[in-house]
Image: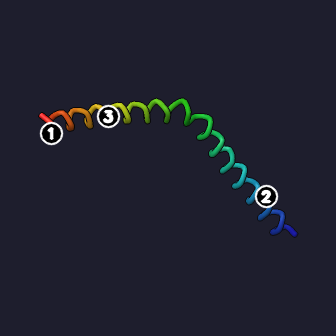
Amino acid sequence: MYTFLYSTYRWVCISSFLLYISVGIFHISPCIVLPFIMFLHSISVKNLLNFSKSVLA
């Protein structure tokens, strides 16, 4: 009985911890990841334009 309670408690702890992490990442990600992706995208677009200009020139 004790081991069953302990394993259930541990499972609840682990699942709630994972849920907390995933929710935290989900809440943080729009604030951090979106500008970062935009930044990388703008860099890649600029590099692509410069590369195409140098190739066409």
Q: Position of residue 31 (x, y in %)?
A: 54, 29
Q: Give the numbered dot on residue 55.
A: 1
Q: Position of residue 37 (x, y in %)?
A: 43, 36
Nearer to us in this view, 47 or 28 = 47
Q: Earlier in the sequence, mark 3 or mark 2?
A: 2
Q: Is residue 13 above or below residue 39?
A: below
Q: Is residue 39 above or below residue 6?
A: above
Q: Give the numbered dot on residue 45.
A: 3
Q: Disc 2 on helix, strand or loop?
A: helix
Residue designated by label 2: 9
Q: Position of residue 33 (x, y in %)?
A: 49, 36
Q: Disc 3 on helix, strand or loop?
A: helix
Task: Determine the residue positioned at 74% across, 59% down.
Answer: 10
Q: Amino acid at mark 1?
A: Val
Q: Amino acid at mark 3?
A: Val
Corner quadrant of residue 6 = bottom right
